Amino acid sequence: MPVTYKKLFHLMIDKGISNATLMEQAGFSANIITRLKRDNYLSLETIEKICKTLHCGVDDVLEFYDDPRKG
């Protein structure tokens, strides 16, 4: 099932956190930001780091959706 991280980027805007700040505080590379922007797979460990950094839950960061191409 595909995933989107649009909720994360909205949350970052609401909290005034830049990509660079999130990378620094969560302790991951620019590659992770690229993967987020492309809605690519992230490990649960990375998602946990994001949630701890932003003091939020997984449902505030990502959302699953149905892929209309499959079915």
Image (cartoon, helix red, strand yellow):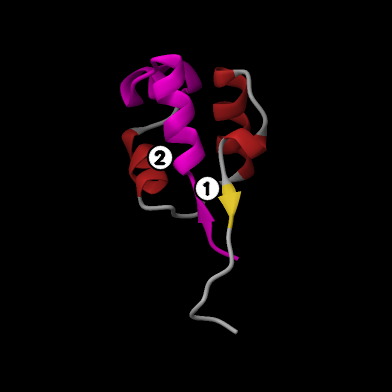
Which numbered disc, 1 or 2, marks the residue that appears first in the sequence? 2
Gap in angstroms between the C-alphas marked 1 and 2: 8 Å
Could you tell me the amino acid type at mark 1? Leu
Which numbered marker is on residue 32? 2
Amino acid at the residue labelled 2:
Ile
Name the residue rendered at 44%, 31% in the picture: 10
Magenta span: predominant SS is helix
Magenta stretch containing residue 38, yes or no?
no
Q: x, y percentage for residue 42?
A: 52, 47
Residue 56 located left or right of residue 22: right
- How dense is the environment of label 1, judged by Cα within 10 Å: few (below 14), some, or many (20 and up)? few
The N terminus - image quarter: bottom right
The answer to whether 26 appears left or right of 17 in the picture is: right
Residues tagged 1 and 2 counted as in contact (Cβ below 8 A): yes
> What kind of element bears circle 2?
helix
Please tell me which residue is depicted at 37% across the width and 38% down the height of the picture.
Answer: 33
The vertical placement of 41 against 62, above or below, is: below
Q: Give, as a single range, the part of the protein colored magenta.
A: 1-27
Question: Is 58 or 41 nearer to us in this picture?
Answer: 58
Mark 1: which secondary structure?
A: loop
* Residue drawn at the location 54% of the way across and 55% of the way down: 3
Residue 30 image offset from top left, x and y in percent: 32, 34
Residue with the mark numbered 1: 42
The C terminus - image quarter:
bottom right
Q: Residue at 58% of width from left, 67% of height from top?
A: 66
Classify mark 2: residues with Cα within 10 Å, few (<14), some (14-19) or many (20+): some
Q: Residue 70: where, in percent of width, then height?
A: 55, 81
Rendered image: mark on residue 70: none
Vertical side of 55 occupied by 3: above or below? below
